[in-house]
Image: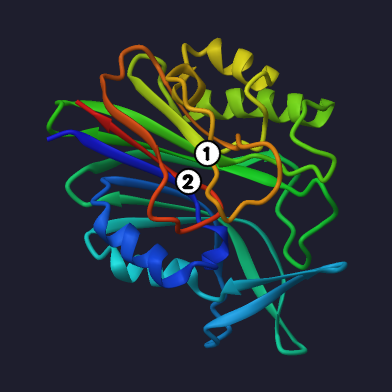
Amino acid sequence: MPLRILSLNAWGGRIHDPLLRYLAAVDADVLCLQEVVRTPASSADWLTYRDADVELPQRANLYEEIRAVLPDHDAFFAPVARGELFDGEIPVPSEFGLATFVRWSHAVIGQSQDFIHGAFLHDQWGPHPRARNAHGVRIFDYAAGAPITIVQLHGLRDPAGKHDTPTRVAQADALVDFIGRVWPGDERLVVCGDLNVLPDSVTFEKLATLGLSDLVVGRGFNDTRTSLYQKPGRYADYMLVTSDVDVSYFEPVAAPEVSDHRALVLEIG
């Protein structure tokens, strides 16, 4: 059986019901999700994120809801910050970050999480560009008889755009250092997520020093966004692999639309 890995920016669960149906049906062994909300102190279904003149609906306990539709997966949550969402006018402390799910049939034999930009804030979201983290798992793939390391991240967002900046270059260096702490260097490696950079970013040069190459641009895809994203620039999400990863299938999924990002689905033979 191939090993199926999915990466998706869940967009705070804004397309809630289709998202949960898709995650339950896609039959992925490893799911790497960005923009996941967890609000243990609230029983509300929806809360509101506010930043200046921006207001966005957020599914209050998206992490727990995804856990419920993936009952045969181990779940890991890596918060990047704890700030305020709003239930009407009432502020509610909420966590926001990465979630990784690994099917029980694959043993998690190592993991690590750390910040690649900034640091955890316990009482605010922080100024832009906000803190970012990465989460990595080493699993034993019994079908292949070998381990594999999978790292996901949500790259920093800069309101000025996705071009390289000194901060993004430093983030790339920190990511390479982080990968070296979870990946032993002599096994298959997959790195994925919403990197928030352009295809010509120095990020890819730095990741190439680990033997990683990107499947999105490398296989001729030029769109990782859905119709729900109305701005110019269609690149955000990437999936990179080392040469020993036997790619049998890869696609930025156009439908169903469960976010303003497309899911990236990789099958390894």
Could you tell me which residue is drawn at 31 percent across and 13 percent down? Answer: 244
Could you tell me which residue is drawn at 15 percent across and 26 percent down? Answer: 144
Residue at image mark 2: 262
Q: Position of residue 159 (x, y in %)?
A: 82, 46
Could you tell me which residue is drawn at 70 percent across and 40 percent down? Answer: 232
On the rendered structure, is 170 left or right of 73? right
User: 72 or 218: which is nearer to us?
Assistant: 218
Residues packed near mark 1 inside 10 Å, few (<14), some (14 to 19) or many (20 plus):
many
Q: Quadrant of residue 246?
A: top left
- The disc label shown at residue 36, or none: none
Q: Position of residue 129 (x, y in %)?
A: 80, 45
Q: Given contact means CB atoms under 8 Å apart, are the residues at marks 2 and 1 in contact?
A: yes
Residues packed near mark 2 inside 10 Å, few (<14), some (14 to 19) or many (20 plus):
many
On the rendered structure, is 41 left or right of 106? right
Q: Position of residue 261 (x, y in %)?
A: 53, 48
Could you tell me which residue is drawn at 22 percent across and 60 percent down? Answer: 72
Q: Quadrant of residue 114?
A: top right
Q: Earlier in the sequence, mark 2 or mark 1?
A: 1
Q: Position of residue 175 (x, y in %)?
A: 61, 29
For the residues labelled 2 and 1, the Cα–Cα distance comes to 5 Å
Colour pattern: rainbow
On the rendered structure, is 220 left or right of 91? left
- The disc label shown at residue 224, or none: 1
Vertical comparison of 85 with 222: above or below: below
Q: Amino acid at mark 1?
A: Thr
Helix, strand or loop at mark 2: loop
User: 178 or 100: which is nearer to us?
Assistant: 100
Helix, strand or loop at mark 1: loop
